[in-house]
Amino acid sequence: MALLPILEYPDPRLRTKARPVAQVDAAVRQLIGDMLETMYEAKGIGLAATQVDRHIQLIVMDLSDEKTAPRVYINPVITPLCEEKSPYDEGCLSVPGFYETVERPSRVQISALDGEGKTFEETADGLLAVCIQHEMDHLSGKLFVDYLSSLKRERIKKKLEKQHKQQA
Ligand code: QAP
Ligand code: CO
């Protein structure tokens, strides 16, 4: 297993649209392991392949307190199950240090392949519903900052660009 570098906003590679996974083979399984390790090390609860510059439809997540419940979603499809939206203070490993409220449908149906390539379905609400929608946005090149006012988004962009320059 290996730690992978995480792309940070406003890196244009975060705007790439992910392709579907054709086959859950050894290379995909390797990437799943590396992404889980990377997510745990960064103290994240969710990570999309886009964030580690791999443009395939793959998401890893672990919402458990003890970090003992890894979840894998390949080629996920979601359908909202209600009109009602709920607010949540979201963050992102690609937008470190910033948290803002985003509203999304409160209940969704998820259909995906698991880490073995087997189809599964589940109904999500609460944090799982927020997280799967946030991570699926990454697969289509979208970030939570896109839901904010342009003023807030520009402020975040400038602060991160400044940090990146100081790191370089
Ligand atoms: C997406 O986000 C998410 O700024 C996953 O300094 C977030 O794992 C879904 C993180 C909230 C639902 C609700 C962010 C770690 C982790 C930071 C994350 C940071 C360190 C974010
Ligand atoms: Co994110």
Image (tube, rainbow, N blue to C red):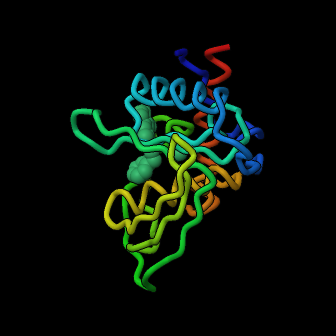
- Residue 99 in sight here: no
Instruction: Check the image and name the residue furthest to the bottom.
Output: 83
Q: Is residue 64 left or right of residue 41?
A: left
- Of the 4 image quadrants, the one containing the C terminus is top right
- Residue 79 in sight here: yes
Q: Is residue 124 left or right of residue 136?
A: left
- In the rendered image, residue 129, in percent from the top left (x then y), is placed at 40, 63
Toward the viewer: 40 or 149? 40
Q: Tell me if residue 104 comes above or below residue 40 in the rendering.
A: below
- In the rendered image, residue 143, in percent from the top left (x then y), is placed at 61, 52
- In the rendered image, residue 90, in percent from the top left (x then y), is placed at 42, 52
- In the rendered image, residue 44, in percent from the top left (x then y), is placed at 41, 35
Toward the viewer: 36 or 105? 36
Q: Is residue 55 left or right of residue 58?
A: right
Toward the viewer: 107 or 118? 118
Count the marks.
0
Location of residue 76 (image quadrant): bottom right
Q: Tell me if residue 108 comes above or below residue 62 in the rendering.
A: below
Q: Residue at x 62, y 58 (%)?
A: 146
Q: Residue at x 55, y 15 (%)?
A: 2
Q: Residue at x 51, y 41 (%)?
A: 115
Q: Residue at x 64, y 42 (%)?
A: 157
Q: Is residue 100 left or right of residue 165?
A: left
